[in-house]
Image (cartoon, rainbow, N blue to C red):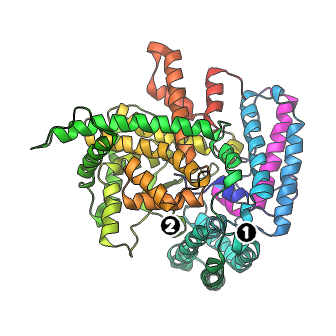
Amino acid sequence: MTPISRRSALVLTSSVALTPLVGCSPNKEAAVPAKAAGSSQADSAFTELSKIWMDATFKASPVYATMIGDHRFDSELDDISETGRAARAAIVKDATAKLSAIDRSALSRDNQVDAAMLEESLAQDAFSLDTLKDWSWDPLLYSETGSSVVYSLMAREFAPIDQRLISAAARMEKMPDFLAQVRKTLVAEAVPEIHAKTYSRQNGGTTAIIDELILPAADKLGPDDRKRLLAAADQAKAAVAEHQAWIDKTLLPSAKGDFRLGKNFDQKLRFSINETTPKEELRKRAEANALAIREEMYEIAASVLTAQTGAKPLPAKPTDEQKRTTVAAAFALAAAQRPAREHLFDDAKRALDDATTYVRDHAIVTLPDAPVRVQVMPKFQQGVAVANCDSPGPLDRNLETFYNISPIPADWTDAQTKSFLSEYNSKMIYELAVHEAMPGHYVQLWHANKHPSVLRAVLASGSFIEGWACYAEDMMIEQGFGAGDPLRKLTNLKMRLRSTDNAILDQGVHVDGWGEKTAMDFMTREGFQEEREAAGKWTRARVSSGQLSSYFVGMTAHWALRKDAQTKAGAGFDLKTYHDTALAHGSPPVRFVRALMFDEAIL
């Protein structure tokens, strides 16, 4: 998965008028949307609107601007007050009106895609501000923003260290007011307990970043700037400690909100998957897909078990329970090949190296010329997923991508650790490397950041991004990477089943009202997940909504696009050319890539 969502950044925007900004950032020119040669009056109007909207958005959300690579506001913090929300609502209303006045049919095809994406984004902003009102009950929005305040400045070397440290000092000085506003904004009784608990675990991430990334570099500054930095760090750490006390003593005891979206799920799902497929149809497709995957799993598992020394014959007409037992037994063989706790990161690096070599040697897709590094996931990102890909923003060219892996918690028992490593065994580590990095998120986002439309990068489709990574898992097996090992193939099917089951779990939790036992039974029995993996997903399903469905939707859309491209090209189909072409359009919803590739209507 990718760690920081556009939604969590844009919902926290501050008071700013919808007028163009003039800045001194070295990225100032790069942030202007590309204008096609021979563009129409409508294209000119849309280009101007895009620039105004992005400028307003980046000024309103300085932390997100830093992540994108616009460094004009690196010393500022988001205003999350009621005044800021009112200003954001005005921005959305004004931009929506201006966009509706543009003749879309007169736009270039690329601008038609961007206009459709902007329209949906504005509708999503309005939904979040006025209907969902997640700013009042979801503290994880503020966890991401608060911790990224300094992390986004220090993680990558986009500017000299002294310049970044001075910006960090300015932001840390503003942290007490930011956290005080969080306490004022959140309605404690409306916050779901699981959100409060996760927030409590993540809140200390800011202190860790200050201690690990900022204070060790303080000597890079002159005496006066160093004195300011150290004072700001103490101020920020004290504010975080005060905030932690409020979380634990006030928020957690009061948190009684319902994490289930209920009637709002349909709309949130539409925005998350970037298409209008009704939830009932999506559920039906996912359940049929899951059934087919489990049947394929049984065939492979049966061949693995019957090949074992002293194996007993399997039933000629097995029942569903017998099939489930057979598959589980085969997965136990894979689970036994788990890394030692201290070797997890070394194994992840080795899997990444092997996948990179295979992609290069088999000409699967053009590889990035920017580096990727396996590292421990920052604390503020932990507690939601086991791994993520943290790529540089589209305006920060050729900087490092981080393949983050969440460490095994120090307080886990031996049984919990064994469960986790059984899930992320030596076979699964390869699937993870493919999904998060090679040729998954790392490769795809590098291609996406080369597209000239910064607006498209800001509005990136989660279903395209996650769908590509899931497609990559299956495609690499198809192309022979690990296909000769039946346990690797079985593990690949487990990942495909997980992506499919995510969509079922999403609705089970938020629509059907599944409790922990029902959800855990579904994941461990039907999805063959280890207890620790399922427990983590149970948390994730409660603190998110709609996003889990994006894996299945995007995966199936990418395969359908590939199939149609292969049919049209016939004997002339070349996989690398196809992949490079599909990834050359940024990260819009897959239906727009299809329209651009096949010259279809943009709807």
Q: Residue at x 60, y 78 (%)?
A: 221
User: Can the viewer see residue 160 in this picture?
Assistant: no
Which quarter of the rendered picture does the C terminus lie within?
top right
Whether residue 76 is situated above or below residue 430 in the rendered picture: below
- Image position of 108 (left or right of 4): right
Whether residue 366 is situated above or below residue 225 in the rendered picture: above
Spatial CA distance of label 1 from label 2 is 20 Å
In this view, the residue in front, 307 or 172, is 307
List the residue tagged with mark 1. 77
The spot of residue 257 in percent (x, y) is 66, 68
Q: Residue furthest top?
A: 571
In this view, the residue in front, 443 or 481, is 481
- What amino acid does circle 2 point to? Pro
Q: Residue at x 35, y 67 (%)?
A: 416
Disc 2 is placed on an element classified as loop
- State the extent of the magenta-drawn residues as a range: 38-67
The spot of residue 214 in percent (x, y) is 55, 75
Disc sitting over residue 378 in the figure: 2
Q: Residue at x 51, y 48 (%)?
A: 502
Q: Residue at x 58, y 48 (%)?
A: 507
- What amino acid does circle 1 point to? Leu
Disc 1 is placed on an element classified as loop
The spot of residue 308 in percent (x, y) is 14, 43
Whether residue 51 is situated above or below residue 246 in the rendered picture: above
- Image position of 539 (left or right of 88): left
In this view, the residue in front, 1 or 414, is 414
Instruction: Answer with mark 1 or mark 2, whichever residue precedes in sequence.
Output: 1
Label 1: how many residues lie within 10 Å, few (<14), some (14-19) or many (20+)?
A: many
Label 2: how many residues lie within 10 Å, few (<14), some (14-19) or many (20+)?
A: some
Disc sitting over residue 30 in the figure: none
